[in-house]
Amino acid sequence: MSRRRIGALAALALATGFCVALVWVRMRYSGSDYHRFLVWNMFLAWLPLLFALALVASDRHGRSRLQLGVLAGLWLLFLPNAPYVLTDFVHLGPSPPVPLWYDALMFTACAWTGLALGIGSLLLVHEVARRRIGERLSWLLLGPVLALVSLGIYLGRFVRLNSWDALTRPGRVADVIATPLRDPLAHPRFLVVTTLFTLFLILTYLVVYTVAELRLEPEDQAARRNRRRV
């Protein structure tokens, strides 16, 4: 694993630790463990990144397409858990004796960290996809993948299904998905939530991807260029 990748994982681990500490302090101060669900959600947000790391390692070691496909399927199945943390803001509100600003910081930290974990895993899988299926097709698949992620967020927040239900109750999940797809206009919340989250995730990924490509120009190259101009 490269030094840069280890650094990214360390930063994400520190951010996660900060989130857990905020929740722990809140529970100790308030005497209530209601917000411990945030810790569980942070754990779930790590799963797609772990599957993405396993996928990258398997690809570099020349594993079979079946193994790569299983890992990619598990990654996609659990990926909605990462940006799902954004929807935990529905629990934000006045809750004395804890000040509202503290809860706002706690939910923001968890949401940002969950989103970063999801985008990080997507960057890794995109790297594998570019090698396996080509640059153009890997970008074309970005929209459908994030649309499925947005669908998963909708199912988790409003239908109260989770990733395991796709394995343990596939019939139930298929029925819940098929109902609004038959007539999306009759299910405005489904249409609005999935559309807005799809657009948001696409834009977020594009911003992170392009910003990550920025590099400071080496000083020696800049100096040579300036000498030529003189």
Image: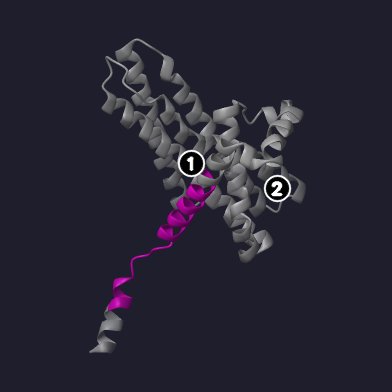
Name the residue rendered at 61%, 36% in the picture. Answer: 187
- Label 2's element? helix
**Residue under numbered circle 2:** 68
Question: Which image quadrant for residue 90?
Answer: top left
- 67 or 153: nearer the viewer: 153
- Label 1's element? helix
Task: Measure the alpha-carbon separation of dots 1 and 2.
Answer: 20 Å
Q: Is residue 125 magenta?
A: no
Using a 10 Å C-alpha cutoff, classify the residue at mark 1 as few (fewer than 14 neighbours), some (14 to 19) or many (20 or more): many
Let me know if residue 75 appears in the view.
Answer: no
Residue type at tag 2: Leu
Q: Which residues are magenta?
A: 197-222
Q: Position of residue 19 (x, y in %)?
A: 38, 30
Name the residue rendered at 42%, 47% in the picture. Answer: 7
Name the residue rendered at 28%, 18% in the picture. Answer: 98
Q: Is residue 206 magenta?
A: yes
Against 100, is 185 above or below? below
Where the C terminus falls, by quadrant?
Answer: bottom left
Contact between marks 1 and 2 (CB within 8 A): the answer is: no
Furthest residue toward front: 186
**Residue under numbered circle 1:** 117
Residue type at tag 1: Leu
Against 152, is 143 above or below? below
Q: Position of residue 75 (x, y in %)?
A: 62, 41
Left or right: residue 6 versus residue 167 is: left
Q: Position of residue 94 (x, y in %)?
A: 31, 21
Let me know if residue 210 appears in the view.
Answer: yes
Query: Which dot marks residue 145?
Result: none
- 56 or 87: nearer the viewer: 87
Furthest residue toward top: 31
Left or right: residue 135 versus residue 20 is: right
